[in-house]
Amino acid sequence: MPDQPAPSGFSVPHVARLVREAIPPMHPGGRPLVLGVAAVAGLVRAVTGRGAVPGALATAATAAFFRAPRRVRPPLDGVVLAAADGTVATVSDVLPPAELDLPRVPTPRVSVFLSVLDVHVQRMPVDGRVVDVAYRPGVFLSADLDKASEDNERNAVLVESTDGARIGVVQIAGLLARRIVCQVKAGDEVAAGETYGLIRFGSRVDTYLPPGSRVTVAVGQRTIGGETAVAELPASDSLGEV
């Protein structure tokens, strides 16, 4: 009986593609730290002749922290997507921070806490345009505390959706975080689910919704940035009402 050809699924290009898809790309903001860890590991190895395995593991762990996995946005209209991977810490109506320049009335806020094991890139919650970006220095309290939203170092992005809704997303540094990266500026056109920033090590992301929005997540629920719908926006004809 003649030999049967190997299944096409076992071809080298196919296997290589599967490997590439299984390993998430790394956010550019993490490259300097990964290179730094690799350089230190290489130096230790060169000087002592030891530490190759710990150095490789440390470099791999640092690269894994800055992973930016590909995400597929859900085919839904009129929703706000999670800006981050993590656990919903609080859902409440609060006054938005002054730097967002939103009406000074209580609005729904969904706070997502990111542990050191979570993906730490942030993603746009809606299609639209960046209205403003404002950085505020602060302290570095544990990000799971409610007062972290007011006291910690943070970066606020105000986005206006294609339907005219204004949503605020605030990156908040945590106890271990010492660097907030934001890649967008006022006037940029953005798409829901696309990566726009990064917080290095444990942190929090607050999303401020227009009054009348219906929150669709609960405290303790896990969110997937760019995929989980955290709220449904009010009808477009009511967005101008306060």
Image: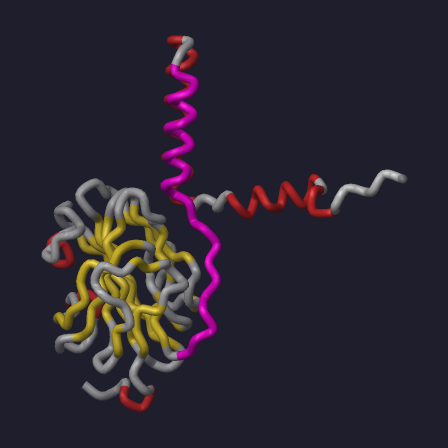
Residue 195 lies in quadrant: bottom left
Residue 167 in the image: above or below residue 227: below
Residue ranking furthest to the right: 1
Q: Quarter-wise, where is residue 45 in the image?
A: top left
Could you tell me which quadrant the C terminus lies in? bottom left
Q: In the displayed image of the protein, which residue is found farthest to the top? A: 48
* Residue 153 vs residue 58, the one in the foreground: 58
**Residue depicted at x 42% and y 67%:** 192
Which residue: 29% across, 63% down? 157
Colour scheme employed for the rendering of this structure: secondary structure
Q: Residue at x 64, y 42 (%)?
A: 15
Q: Position of residue 92 (x, y in %)?
A: 15, 69
> Is residue 202 left or right of 144 when viewed as pictured?
right
Q: Is residue 52 magenta?
A: yes
In the picture, which quadrant includes the N terminus?
Answer: top right
Residue 82 colored in magenta in the image: no
* Residue 231 picture location, percent across and down: 30, 73
Q: Position of residue 175 (x, y in %)?
A: 17, 43
Task: From the top left corner, tell me how far across and down residue 20 is, in percent.
Answer: 57, 44
In the figure, residue 132 lies in which quadrant?
bottom left
Residue 24 left/right relative to 109: right
Against 211, residue 188 (above or below) is above
In the picture as drawn, the residue positioned furthest to the bottom comes out as 237
Specify whether 21 is left or right of 212: right
Q: Which residues are magenta?
A: 51-77
On screen, 222 above or below 5? Answer: below
- Against 50, residue 143 (above or below) is below
**Residue appearing at x 37%, y 15% in the figure:** 44
